[in-house]
């Protein structure tokens, strides 16, 4: 193996690990919603797009850039966008999603779920196209000097191999890991976390022991939306975006979540990580335009060959 | 084809043609064509998703393949679209068959996600191939030969013919066993299998047909616009548009997509033209809002909303067509196949049957025989393994050990619809009637397994209805029936397949004493006619007057097998039902 191949391989692996951590965070947001509510949200990518724009406008127009500067600013904006999107998610659940989900449809088999799918498809269309109306179809990005500078690992392998670690991506990856750790703590050891888990386990039984399932669902949906939006904000310095960007990410998210086993939060993180690595490694052999197709194909393969996910168990009973 | 629905269709088509003739503005000519294109696409989508209930979020894949096939065929080979459009239908059909074969293994969530992914994956491939924008080469000589008209009204005319053809095709499907099979799948796939319907084959036929029609429409769409981009034929909005016009207008009826397209396409087009400059994307917002409003307020679409309202207003007289077949009444309908009960042959033999789910032994080492023409009751407390036992008997689940012999032949690995063909009928614990269909239509679904054609199926169905004693409600829609009538209707549906052996899952549950007695009378009459019956119940009360023998299950195993008289005095049975405390009193 020549050093240049090794370098390319390691470089892609590093890029995959970094972007995979952010994808992991995105997937965790989606998995939280699915895990607690059993709702497939087609609009998750578009909520993320909205989160990216909120972060963008907070950064350039609402004083985050002048106050915190170009280095810390983008992260502050991403973290400020999260509570905004929490509110958006909460309202979306209260006024739309809750009417076709929750204990009301717990008994329904196919049709109930289809109502949710179709509703979220409608929300996705509205967000994408209203986004185009309001934000325009120009590609925008959150500019920070970090996105074009890197730490260098090496030289290794007899002075030939050097690996560049993009600073903005590295910071985003670390922040993602911290947020996931915090979320795991929240779900594992707080009262709210218990309510969420109880609602996920058996909504009817949870009601009987005094859990407000509808409220738990609202919180889960809002939290999932805000986490995915935060991931979007963390991506924004490196990945320019536009109102239809959600479509590209929603398949990445579902690929990760299905790979991790629908409903498992930690599984979703590893699933997102795997997708990030697959995507970046595919760049070694495929043209850029086919990277997303590679993910689609990978996703279809997962769904067809191992629908319970790599980390999930078979639970289906006829 | 019936005149009653064909006539309004033809009148509408002629009216549309006449109106389009007076439209001179080329923009409105285009709109009149596009309404029909999307209505046709909605019809094609409805043919699969509307009737089977499997919602496809990715029909753009067929549309786009048809579109690109036609564009490339003209650009590279100079073929005429008159030839390319029919071939595009073959391409779409092949894609449908392939995608169906791959994807039907998936259950609801996964099916939806996979369907969403297909067109988006292909979209990128066409981008990569460098087909960002293809323009159909203009033909000045022989333009008609290449389907290139200077007069936009010609496209509208072609679109009218195409739409009418698809409506007639859809209606033909709807009324045949094809449509009945799809509706049965939509209501309950397991019940459909048990009624003798090979669900996988029918679903594949539906998606193939739907894909073929969609491919042809996509091909025609290219000829209307003369330019194609991946986003305009594979994009998410394309799939969403087919889904939206249908959901909005009405799912599972040919009128739905027509109504939906007639309202939504002009609205979005006009708004796009007037406001598109300031607000690009307003079209998508309209579709999105339309979906949201429909799902929240009229989930089945405008057509059904209005029809249900009208029906309520005019009372129950407006119900669908009555069964126009002379049927014998319950008493004399008996086929002269009565077999003496004692000393008959054994029709069903169960040997050492076992089935576990993880650590739970649902059925353990169960053995019993059923004599032809007898009624066997299987009872046991909740969770005793009764329904699992039934699932093993008719092929829904495979046993871990032991075997089931029907007429001396093992049925291991035989699918439910094959068993149904072999004469095993079944009803389900949870009733799943088709609420908008009449009793006669509900029952006919079960008759196709034995019938060579539609007329014969209706005859079998009428016969089964008579034997279940439902003749005087045969024309009513199922949603108006009482629980007892619904139970009898499910029974009639199973009877329509002319079973030799009937497996009844809690047919008496939820009935009052008098109602249960009526059902018991019907069942006894069936047994006299030679049909063997195995019935599950968890209460013993009414069963004592019905069955010839009891098998009592407890914790998955046979506790005791005996006559009703002996069973009611058996202390083990009382213990299983009421606990040890009560057995002392027996």
Image (cartoon, coloured by chain):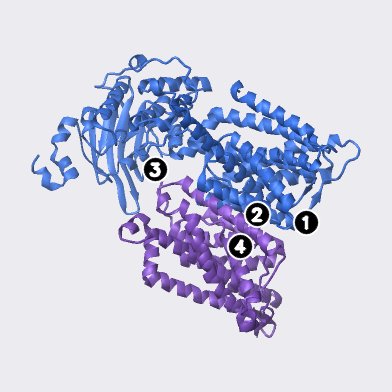
Chain colours: A purple, B blue
Q: Nearer the viewer, mark 1 or mark 3?
A: 1
Checking the image for residue A249, the label placed there is 4
Check the residue under mark 4 and report the chain it is in: A
| Mark 1 residue element | loop
* Residue behind mark 1: B130
Where does residue A266 sit, x and y in percent of width and height? Answer: 47, 67
Depth order, front residue of B41/B380: B41
State which tag comes first along the sequence, 2 or 1.
2
- Quarter occupied by the N terminus of chain B: top right
Residue at x 71%, y 55% (from the top left corner): B125
Q: Do circles 4 and 2 both sit on a common chain?
A: no
Give the residue at mark 3.
Answer: B398
Residue labelled with disc 2? B120
Image-based side of A164 in relation to B362, left or right: right
- Quarter occupied by the C terminus of chain B: top left
Q: Is there one chain holding both mark 3 and mark 4?
A: no
CA gap, disc 1 to disc 4? 23 Å
Q: Residue B576: x and y, percent?
A: 19, 44
Q: Nearer the viewer, residue A6 or A269?
A: A269
What is the distance, in whole Å, between disc 1 and disc 3 at their CAs? 51 Å
């Amino acid at each position: 193996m020549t050093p240049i191949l090794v370098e390319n391989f390691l470089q892609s692996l590093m890029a995959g690990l970094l972007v995979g951590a952010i994808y992991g965070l995105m997937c965790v947001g989606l998995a939280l919603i699915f895990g607690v509510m059993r709702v497939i949200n087609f609009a998750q990518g578009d909520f993320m797009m909205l989160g990216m724009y909120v972060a963008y406008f907070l950064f350039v127009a609402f004083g985050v850039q002048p106050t915190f500067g170009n280095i810390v600013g983008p992260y502050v904006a991403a973290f400020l966008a999260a509570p905004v999107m929490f509110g958006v998610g909460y309202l979306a659940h209260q006024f739309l999603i809750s009417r076709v989900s929750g204990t009301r449809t717990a008994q329904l088999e196919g049709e109930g779920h289809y109502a949710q799918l179709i509703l979220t498809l409608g929300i996705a269309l509205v967000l994408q196209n209203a986004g185009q109306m309001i934000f325009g179809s120009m590609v925008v990005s959150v500019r920070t000097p970090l996105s074009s500078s890197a730490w260098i690992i090496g030289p290794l392998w007899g002075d030939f191999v050097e690996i560049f670690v993009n600073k903005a991506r590295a910071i985003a990856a670390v922040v993602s890991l911290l947020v996931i750790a915090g979320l795991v703590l929240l779900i594992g050891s707080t009262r709210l976390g218990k309510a969420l888990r109880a609602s996920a386990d058996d909504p009817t039984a949870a009601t009987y022991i005094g859990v407000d399932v509808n409220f738990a669902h609202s919180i889960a949906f809002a939290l999932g939306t805000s986490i995915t939006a935060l991931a979007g904000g963390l991506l924004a310095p490196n990945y320019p975006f536009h109102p239809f960007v959600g479509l590209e990410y929603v398949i990445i998210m579902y690929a990760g979540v299905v790979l991790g086993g629908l409903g498992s939060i930690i599984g979703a993180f590893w699933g997102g990580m795997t997708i990030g690595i697959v995507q970046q490694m595919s760049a070694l052999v495929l043209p850029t335009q086919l990277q997303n197709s590679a993910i689609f194909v990978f996703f279809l393969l997962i769904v067809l060959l191992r629908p319970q996910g790599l980390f999930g168990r078979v639970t289906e009973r006829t | 084809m019936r005149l009653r629905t064909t006539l309004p269709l033809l009148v509408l088509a002629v009216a549309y043609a006449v109106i389009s003739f007076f439209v001179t503005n080329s923009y409105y000519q285009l709109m009149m064509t596009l309404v029909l294109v999307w209505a046709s696409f909605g019809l094609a989508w409805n043919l699969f998703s509307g009737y089977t209930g499997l919602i496809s979020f990715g029909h753009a894949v067929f549309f786009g393949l048809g579109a690109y096939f036609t564009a490339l065929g003209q650009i590279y080979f100079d073929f005429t679209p008159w030839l390319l459009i029919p071939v595009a239908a073959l391409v779409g059909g092949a894609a449908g068959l392939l995608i169906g074969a791959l994807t039907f293994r998936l259950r609801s969530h996964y099916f939806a996600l996979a369907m969403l992914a297909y067109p988006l994956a292909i979209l990128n491939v066409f981008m990569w191939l460098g087909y960002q924008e293809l323009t159909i080469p203009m033909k000045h000589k022989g333009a008609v030969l290449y389907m290139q008209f200077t007069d936009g009204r010609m496209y509208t005319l072609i679109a009218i013919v195409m739409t009418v053809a698809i409506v007639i095709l859809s209606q033909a499907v709807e009324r045949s066993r094809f449509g009945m099979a799809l509706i049965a799948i939509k209501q309950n796939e397991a019940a459909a299998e048990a009624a003798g319907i090979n669900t996988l084959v029918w679903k594949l036929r539906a998606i193939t047909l739907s894909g073929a029609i969609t491919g042809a429409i996509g091909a025609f769409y290219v000829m209307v616009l003369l330019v194609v981009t991946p986003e305009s034929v594979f994009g998410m909005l394309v799939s969403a548009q087919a889904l939206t016009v249908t959901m909005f207008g009405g799912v599972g009826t040919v009128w739905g997509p027509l109504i939906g397209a007639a309202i939504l396409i002009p609205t979005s087009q006009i708004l796009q033209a007037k406001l598109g400059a300031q607000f690009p994307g307003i079209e998508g917002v309209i579709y999105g809002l339309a979906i949201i409003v429909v799902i929240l307020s009229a989930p089945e679409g405008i057509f059904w909303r209005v029809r249900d309202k009208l029906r309520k207003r005019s009372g129950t007289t407006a119900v669908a067509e009555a069964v126009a077949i002379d049927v014998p009444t319950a008493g004399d309908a008996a086929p002269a196949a009565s077999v003496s009960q004692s000393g008959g042959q054994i029709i069903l033999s169960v040997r050492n049957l076992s089935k576990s789910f993880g650590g739970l032994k649902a059925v353990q080492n169960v053995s019993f025989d059923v004599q032809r023409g007898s009624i066997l009751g299987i009872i046991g407390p909740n969770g005793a393994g009764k329904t699992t036992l039934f699932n093993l008997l008719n092929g829904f689940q495979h046993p871990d050990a032991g075997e089931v012999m029907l007429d001396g032949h093992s049925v291991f690995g035989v699918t439910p619809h094959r068993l149904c063909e072999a004469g095993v009928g079944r009803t389900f614990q949870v009733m799943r009637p088709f609420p908008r269909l009449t009793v006669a239509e509900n029952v006919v679904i079960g008759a196709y397994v034995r019938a060579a054609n539609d007329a014969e199926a209706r005859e079998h169905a009428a016969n089964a209805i008579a034997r279940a004693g439902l003749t005087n409600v045969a024309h009513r829609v199922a949603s108006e029936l009482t629980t007892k009538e619904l139970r009898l209707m499910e029974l009639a549906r199973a009877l329509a397949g002319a079973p030799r052996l009937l497996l009844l899952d809690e047919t008496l549950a939820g009935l009052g004493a008098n109602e249960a007695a009526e059902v018991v009378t019907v069942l006894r009459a069936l047994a006299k006619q030679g049909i063997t019956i195995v019935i599950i119940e968890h209460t013993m009360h009414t069963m004592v007057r019905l069955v010839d023998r009891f098998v009592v299950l407890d914790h998955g195993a046979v506790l005791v097998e005996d006559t009703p008289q002996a069973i009611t005095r058996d202390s083990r049975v009382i213990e299983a039902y009421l606990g040890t405390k009560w057995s002392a009193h027996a």
